[in-house]
Image (spheres, rainbow, N blue to C red):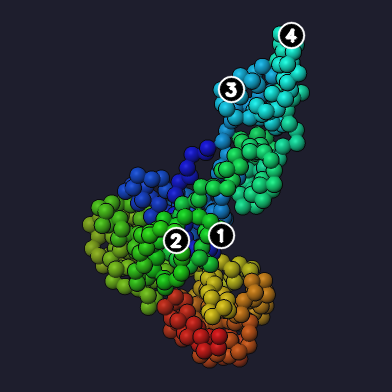
């Protein structure tokens, strides 16, 4: 059986700066404080802000994880093989040693069949019933390729276990050949292993909703949740550590965990966590920000050596503000970005009384660039409604300089009409002093729509 995979630390789909930073930082911390092995993952591409941060501070982005369902490769055993030109005597010796069928390979390491103990016995039946030792010796000298089963079911390592189980159950075999993407031998898989595969162990950061999580999470084992969003339903088979705190950023919680454990992050990881706080709190201008976020930012800035060691808190905060300005500028603007990228790069989905809505957010430094993009953005939202079968799709465009937002919406007309925002002539809605999707927009939208569903 393959060695156990490291426990995956991962944020939500369409990850933002905070989801990436908290995964990187928490995986590092857990590796330092717990005996298990942890690895940071991401469930989507890096946005512009995050790309800026990882390049500036030289951080390797988390590995891309698109699904955590069990694959056949997770349950294979690498069993010794025979070359097709080797003898049946060597096959007998190998089966006696491993107590497993023998995969027979060609010169390119591709399996040509499977040789089992029962198959060998059937091959030797006549010779064994004979009194001639010479006849048995002659059988032992035959090539392995002459006695193998070439009709056995072959599985692919990247197949999902649940997709191949029905076919495996209909097959009389107990062992199946497994090949890689190039068709080369990867190992053997027992039927019993397919019926009870190991589940990928996952730590969730910056979210706790199943529909925002990495695909396949229902087949994984959630070990822990560290988050700063509203509580949702996340079923687990056993009690887990579940921490949700009302702070502006999940990176703040990671920083506090390290502080409590007496650990200091390497300067590049501290810098990424600081960027997570600055991004989620709009450099402390969001209504979600707390004193804990500011204190965590100061600690991280000193670890990251953002200013000289002897710098005062005020000087350090000035350096933090400068980094925050660069970070927000890197992620702001519609420009020539594709509509699909704007609509999908930072979107979260919510269920309201059986209706599903999506709320995306984009940042600009001025609404001046919005007017020319409104028609194609509305068309993009309508496509999202159609493709994802949504009742409504909202795009929140936030002016990070002045702290205001505009909304664009597509979907069911009565849902859009229920939103308590002023409709402007250009097709957008005015949302003054609204900058936080989590704390300001979402509660208002949920309250308005709850009257309709």
Residue that label 1 marks: 215
The answer to whether 294 appears left or right of 97 in the picture is left
Q: Nearer the viewer, mark 2 or mark 1?
A: 2
Residue that label 3 marks: 96
Mark 4 and mark 1 lie on one chain; the one further toward the N terminus is 4
The answer to whether 244 appears left or right of 159 in the picture is left
Name the element at disc 1: loop
Q: Residue 126: x and y, percent?
A: 76, 18
Please say whether residue 362 is visible from this viewpoint: no
Q: Nearer the viewer, mark 1 or mark 3?
A: 3
Residue that label 2 marks: 236
**CB under 8 Å between discs 1 and 3:** no
Q: Label 2, label 4: how many angstroms apart (C-alpha)?
A: 64 Å
Q: Residue 448: x and y, percent?
A: 50, 87
**CB under 8 Å between discs 4 and 1:** no
Q: In the image, is residue 266 above or below residue 382?
A: above
Q: Label 3, label 4: how many angstroms apart (C-alpha)?
A: 23 Å
**Which residue appears at 54% of the width and 64% of the height?**
14
Estimate how packed mark 3 is, as few (under 14), some (14 to 19) or many (20 or more) residues with alpha carbons within 10 Å: few
**Which residue appears at 28% of the width and 71% of the height?**
291
Mark 2 and mark 1 lie on one chain; the one further toward the N terminus is 1
Q: Label 3, label 2: how many angstroms apart (C-alpha)?
A: 43 Å
**CB under 8 Å between discs 3 and 2:** no
Estimate how packed mark 2 is, as few (under 14), some (14 to 19) or many (20 or more) residues with alpha carbons within 10 Å: few
Q: Which mark is residue 373?
A: none
Q: Residue 306: x and y, percent?
A: 33, 58
Mark 2 and mark 4 lie on one chain; the one further toward the N terminus is 4
Q: Which mark is residue 132?
A: 4
């Amino acid at each position: 059986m393959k060695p156990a995979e490291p426990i995956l630390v991962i944020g939500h789909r369409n990850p933002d700066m905070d989801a990436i930073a908290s995964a990187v930082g928490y995986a590092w911390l857990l590796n330092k404080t717990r005996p298990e092995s942890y690895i940071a993952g991401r469930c989507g591409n890096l946005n512009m802000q995050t790309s800026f941060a990882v390049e500036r501070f030289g951080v390797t982005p988390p590995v891309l994880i698109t699904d955590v369902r069990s694959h056949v490769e997770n349950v294979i055993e690498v069993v010794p093989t025979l070359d097709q030109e080797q003898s049946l005597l060597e096959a007998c010796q190998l089966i006696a040693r491993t107590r497993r069928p023998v995969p027979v390979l060609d010169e390119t390491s591709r399996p040509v069949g499977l040789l089992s103990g029962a198959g060998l016995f059937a091959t030797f039946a006549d010779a064994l019933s004979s009194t001639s030792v010479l006849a048995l010796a002659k059988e032992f000298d035959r090539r392995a390729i002459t006695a193998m089963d070439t009709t056995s079911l072959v599985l692919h390592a990247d197949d999902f276990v649940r997709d191949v189980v029905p076919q495996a159950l209909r097959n009389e075999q107990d062992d199946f050949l497994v090949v890689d993407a190039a068709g080369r031998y990867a190992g053997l898989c027992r039927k019993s292993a397919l019926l009870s595969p190991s589940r990928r162990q996952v730590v969730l950061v910056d979210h706790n909703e199943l529909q925002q999580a990495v695909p396949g999470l229902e087949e994984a084992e959630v070990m822990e949740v560290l988050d700063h969003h509203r509580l949702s339903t996340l079923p687990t088979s056993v009690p887990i550590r579940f921490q949700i705190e009302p702070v502006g950023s999940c990176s703040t919680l990671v920083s506090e965990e390290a502080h409590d454990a007496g650990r200091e992050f390497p300067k590049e990881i501290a810098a990424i966590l600081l960027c997570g706080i600055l991004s989620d709190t709009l450099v402390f201008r969001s209504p979600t920000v707390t004193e804990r976020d500011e204190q965590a930012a100061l600690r991280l800035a000193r670890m990251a050596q953002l200013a000289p060691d002897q710098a005062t808190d005020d000087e350090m905060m000035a350096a933090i503000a400068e980094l925050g300005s660069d970070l927000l500028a890197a992620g702001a603007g519609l420009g020539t970005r594709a509509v699909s990228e704007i609509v999908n790069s930072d979107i979260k989905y919510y269920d309201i009384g059986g209706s599903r809505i999506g709320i995306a957010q984009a940042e600009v430094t001025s609404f001046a660039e919005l007017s020319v993009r409104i028609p194609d953005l509305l068309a993009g939202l309508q496509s999202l409604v159609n493709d994802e079968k949504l009742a409504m799709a909202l795009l929140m465009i936030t002016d990070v300089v002045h702290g205001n937002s505009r909304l664009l919406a597509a979907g069911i007309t009565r849902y859009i009409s229920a939103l308590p925002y002023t409709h402007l002539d250009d097709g957008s809605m005015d949302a003054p002093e609204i900058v936080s999707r989590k704390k300001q927009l979402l509660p208002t939208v949920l309250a308005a729509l709850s009257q309709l569903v």
